[in-house]
Image: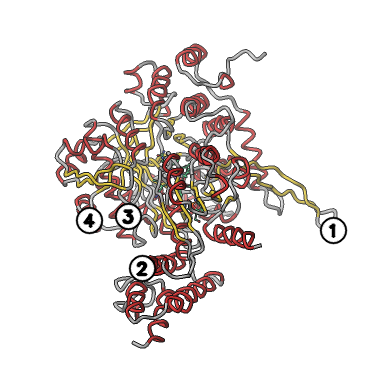
Amino acid sequence: MPREGILVPNPYERITDEQVQQIHQASLQILVDPGLICFSKKAAEIFHSNGAEVTTASSGDNPCWHIKIPEKLVIEALDSAPKTVKLGARNPDNALIMKGDEPRVYFISGSETNIWLDVDFHTYVRKSDRSIEIKVPEFHPRRSTLADLCQSAHVCEHLETLDGYIRTVNIQDEDITEDNKDVNKFFASLNNTTKHFMSGLTKLEQLDNVVRMAELIAGGKEALKENPIISFITCLVKSPLQFVEDTTDTFIEVCQRGLPAVVSSSPQAGTTAPIKEAGIMAQINAEVLAGITLGQLVNKGTPLLYGSVPVRARMDTLGDSYGSVETSQYNIDCVQMARFYKIPNYSTSGVCDTKIPGQQASIERLFSDIVVTLSGPQYLHCAYGLLDGNAVFCLLQAVLDDAHFQMLKFFLKPARINQPELNEVLKQIREVVATPQKLYIGYIRQVMRSGEISAPYPFEGDGESDSVFALAYQRMNELLGKPVEHIAPDTTAKIFQEIPGLLPRLNVYRERK
Amino acid sequence: MSEEDIIARLKENVIQGRKTQQDEGMDEKLSGTPGVVELTRLALEEKIPLEEIINKALTVGMRVVGEKFSTKEYFIPDMLASADAVGEAMDILKPLLEVSSIETKGKFAIATVKGDIHDIGKNIVAILLKGMGYEVNDLGTDVPTEKIIEFIKKESPDYLGLSALLTTTMTEMGVVIEALKDSGLRDRVKVLIGGAAVSDEYAQEIGADAYCVDSFHAIKVLDSFQRSEIN
Ligand code: B12
């Protein structure tokens, strides 16, 4: 049985069917004029041999090609791209099954920040009355490490609402090099969560090692096909409309192996895409379609997600403003585009502009989490714990986020209004109205125990002061104290034998001297 | 148009950040009228002296833009549009400047290092510095160290700006600095670094001359270099 996620009853639509069609048409036009600049020789050859118009262009010293993708290729690709994509998991009950036309939402973490935010609490005394003390959280940024990645996978394993794990932090230990980064990143994550694991790849040469590791865990080549416990996120298109060499080459290799991949594009309205909604939408949709077309040309039927990370520029720094309202609008438009193509969608919410947890962080995240979830994306990178654009990860924030996704999931349960239910309550009403106290309390108790009543906010304090952070911190430590099911000893031994570059300290069965 | 008119309109268009006649700018009243490029050409045709064009229109205009920016009336897109327009005007004036006695603020070469394709930040720095009177050479993204060294040998820029956003590519900055030392060029050029992955400490670690948080910081740092050179 796969994970349930949450099926959104009547998904919110921001744009009309006619607008969806208009964007689709505009994107097809973009793919021909101006077309794309391609820095990957392999991709240019693939497009060329499949009938796209490819001409040599040049940009400084780097060889590149100008590609015009005809409508026919795009339509064929949309046809052959799977409409149902399965992302497997070490524990098969954690698999995710995504159907492009079904608004079932899975909540996912993410994505590779360089900064990890530690928290501790200090006691402050009021100057005018020294008997009054409060505890205040302080946040301390530092560079993230392998141990942090393990910790966050561990906590994410136990966050009930979290359906899949995208690596949260970039590992920057002294002994991590470009060559051993991928294997350690994958092992650390897979060993600490039994949920699906998705990541980018640092070095293409490491792809086979990573895939081999996944095969050993899944139980062989075929077993991995059946239960793809890993998948890849690749930003192959750099906005506007450029296939980047290394990520495109990685994408091609992932598609050749038939493993699931996200075709992700992240234009920024105002800088790398037009500031107008129609413009960024026509462009991002063209960019994703270009990626999907390439993937299907490489390997017909290879599973892909329509990946959209559109964002509006901040006017003061020209950095990303994930907290802006428009960012949610673009994301919802993309959800609708993907549903129109019936291809499962990877969408974004929850990332905020603020640097530390607090009121602004809560408001920004909750706003986008609610509105984007309501539109029904299948794979929502709702970014548990992510702050400051994409720059900071805070585990405490991830625990806080879980609480609001509980509320959101509860809210989206279908309404239980039907004739038998109404017959029953009518009887209740008549009975209660006839009693002297006129209270329905007697009917609460069963319902209360059936899970039909939403739980109180888990971090509510009992006094006048706000205890949210302190209680969430306590919860975080409880979760860290709960065991996780690591990869079995014999498989671990095999992995350490076969896969080069793994750091011995990741082996939980290693005898400590 | 009289000389004063041309200068006034040039200044106004710098403030409005309107590069060309087609530019939509921000004030609808100006749409369709000549922008900075056309007005600069016109000024030359009318034989308005270079100093006048630069000092009374371009520089003054940019100063107003800077003031509006610091009072938060203007945002970065406004600042960049003006800087971009002034940069373009300077390109037009360049051949004449070379035979005149007017000097630019210096040559600034900028590149995103090998393996890294992030360029939004690098482009912003390049546009702004050009608008501020630096002669900017943008070497592009994913630029191999050898190419940077070759450029420095050939063109002897005063400053080298390096950008990296990935922790895996920031080490390339150290490689560039080592290569500068090995080719005996380190003393000839000041190295500024920037990008999400790097920090002040990192600049010190690899022996760069400065780390810049953003493009405005870069202007301040360059000003401080210039002051210390004068002193
Ligand atoms: C936009 C973006 C992209 C775009 C790039 C578009 C483009 N044209 O540049 C796309 C989608 C293509 C992209 C691709 C990738 N990205 Co990216 N990207 C970003 C993002 C979100 C914003 C960067 C940005 O443009 N900021 C806005 C500009 C204005 O700011 P800035 O670059 O910092 O520049 C300012 C200052 O730093 C300074 N400055 C910068 N350079 C210089 C140089 C000098 C000389 C000076 C003086 C000043 C200076 O001045 C600038 C102006 O104020 C960052 C996250 C972040 N917060 O930085 C991730 C980020 C950098 N990317 C990341 C990753 C992982 C990638 C990919 C590897 C993803 C993948 N799996 O495919 C690829 C990289 C491929 C490659 N080989 O380079 C990670 C890096 C983590 C790490 N390992 O270090 C980040 C941090 C996001 C994350 N948390 O996951 N990315």
- Looking at the image, is mark 3 or mark 4 earlier in the sequence? 3
Q: Is residue B231 above or below residue A490?
A: below
Circle 3 packing at 10 Å, graded few (<14), some (14-19), many (20+), is: some
Marks 4 and 2 close (CB-CB < 8 Å): no
**Left or right: residue A47 compared with residue B64:** left
Disc 3 to disc 2, C-alpha distance: 50 Å
Disc 1 to disc 2, C-alpha distance: 69 Å
Residue that sits furthest to the bottom in the current view: B2
Nearest to the observer: residue B67 or residue A352: B67
Circle 1 packing at 10 Å, graded few (<14), some (14-19), many (20+), is: few
Circle 4 packing at 10 Å, graded few (<14), some (14-19), many (20+), is: some
Q: Is residue B161 above or below residue B8?
A: above
Marks 1 and 3 close (CB-CB < 8 Å): no
In the rendered image, the quadrant that contains the N terminus of chain A is top left
Residue at (39, 42) in percent of width and height: A105
In the rendered image, the quadrant that contains the C terminus of chain A is top right
Q: Which residue is label 2 attached to?
A: B92
Q: Chain of mark 2?
A: B
| In this view, the mark in front (4 or 2) | 2
Name the amino acid type tagged 4. Ala
Q: Is residue A193 above or below residue A56?
A: above
> Is there one chain holding both mark 4 and mark 2?
no
Marks 1 and 4 close (CB-CB < 8 Å): no
Residue A13 has which mark?
A: 3
- Looking at the image, is mark 1 or mark 3 earlier in the sequence? 3
The spot of residue A265 in percent (x, y) is 35, 46
